[in-house]
Image (cartoon, rainbow, N blue to C red):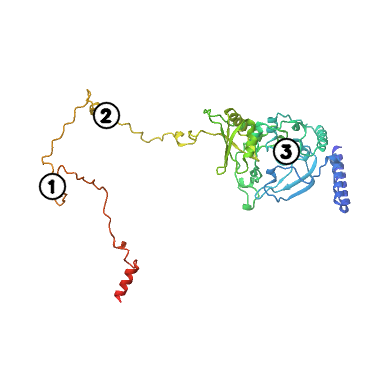
Amino acid sequence: MSKSTNTYNRQNWETSLSNAKNKTTSQSPTKREFTSEIILSACFGFGREAIQSTDFPILCQTCLGDNPYIRMTKEAHGKECKICVRPFSVFRWCPGKGMRYKKTEVCQTCSKLKNICQTCLLDLEYGLPVQVRDSALGLTDSVPKSDVNKEYYTQNMEKQLANTDGTTAAGELERAEAKNDLLLKLARTTPYYQRNKPHICSFWVKGECNRGDECPYRHEMPSDPNDPLSRQNIKDRYYGVKDPVANKLLKRASAMPSLKPPEDKTITTLYIGGLEGRVSVEDLRDHFYQFGEIRSINIVQRQQCAFVCFTTRVAAELAAERSFNKLILQGRRLKVMWGRSQGQAPPDSKSSVKLTPVPGLPGALPPPPPPPASSTTADSTGAAGSAPPVPMLPPPPHAIGVIPPLPPAMAHFRLPPPPPPGSQASIPPPMRGHRPPVHYPSQDPHRLGTGKQNYSNESKASN
């Protein structure tokens, strides 16, 4: 009975659909769309208000791509939503060169209930999974799972969203806290276009792909088949339950380091990095003035950093605690660290690095032994226990003022006689390393025509 009934209903549905197509060939586009909505309402059991027809999807910047001149194809009532199982308009586009084609997966009503993208189902404000956002804000999932309750809940939320301008969230997300430390730490401030890469070619992994460079899929080996990231479910992502990506982000947040204040209590300066010319002094002052009085703000354009100096250490510690891994200005995440005193060496200097010794090399030489006590010289006072005085050498056998005879090998040297004793003539100091200048013929300025007068006189004499 059920089989015949299903067959009969399917035949009636095909007949009514063909008749409606024949009637809409001569109608305007508005009447055609209205007729298709009536057909879908009769076939799927939804009211006309439950069938969506939009002109543009709700997407994040990553899924939209970096191409400002993007082309999309729209298929009105092309597929059913993977959450509420209602027909909606499907959009398909290519986010950029070398990327895979993407399409919307859920309807706009389900997207507005969670404030997520229709394609990747990540939060539109922070770029994080629903599970991470709800755990940080302390929200509980209030969307029912059964078909009847889900439809009733969705219709009530659509009426609530119809009275707003479309920029506010619905349900518990509307009453949630605006800012959260965990969300500011994990929030993505720039698009991540690597997520739009093509999928891995399964034929290439098996060695059976014959397309070569024309293959639209990636020719790479998968990382790990047992990786939990390879088993993602779109409903788990939407409801925020057992999401492997969310679990990975929560573990990363728990392992994040903290910024410890330096031991030197005189340091009241914070280092702000990653400005990239977008953040001005006014932006930094507007953020840091809430923590205490600011003494000065200096921006170093060459290194794209800034130094914020407070008047008190308490204000600097409060600013460092509230801004570390949370400071986002002009759409960029800035790096916050403590400054250091002028006499303190940087932490990455070579003096603070301790290297492990290389095995097999000889060790350092031992220090030399101390000199013996008997080799110490006597002091000027002649104290007891000093070494005996060195005996004086006898005078030379020749008389003073007489040049001793030179050895046979040095007989050709003739030194001048010394001055007589008692004379005031001073002996010049010896000239060590001094040699008389050497004259080269090429240095003569009158050679090779360098002197005009001499050259003209020579030419006249030759004539």
Can residue 248 be seen from the camera position used here?
Answer: no
Relative height, residue 316 to residue 30 (above, below): above
- The CA span between labels 3 and 1 is 107 Å
Q: Which residue is mark 1?
A: 407
Residue 186 circle label: none
Please name the amino acid that badge 2 sits on.
Answer: Pro
Crowding at mark 2 (Cα within 10 Å: few <14, some 14-19, many 20+): few
Q: Which residue is mark 2?
A: 371
Q: Residue at x 75, y 46 (%)?
A: 91
User: For residue 362, what is the image quadrant?
Assistant: top left
Q: Position of residue 290 (x, y in %)?
A: 65, 31
The disc, 1 or 2, on the residue closer to the chain's N-terminal end is 2
Secondary structure of residue under mark 3: loop
- The CA span between labels 3 and 2 is 83 Å
Q: Position of residue 325 (x, y in %)?
A: 61, 34
Q: Nearer the viewer, residue 195 or 376?
A: 376
The disc, 3 or 2, on the residue closer to the chain's N-terminal end is 3
Crowding at mark 3 (Cα within 10 Å: few <14, some 14-19, many 20+): many
Q: Is residue 192 left or right of residue 166?
A: left
C-beta proximity under 8 Å, tags 3 and 1? no
Q: Position of residue 218 (x, y in %)?
A: 63, 47
Q: Which residue is mark 3?
A: 116
- Which quarter shows the C terminus? bottom left
- Which quarter shows the N terminus? top right
C-beta proximity under 8 Å, tags 3 and 2? no
Q: Nearer the viewer, residue 246 or 16?
A: 246
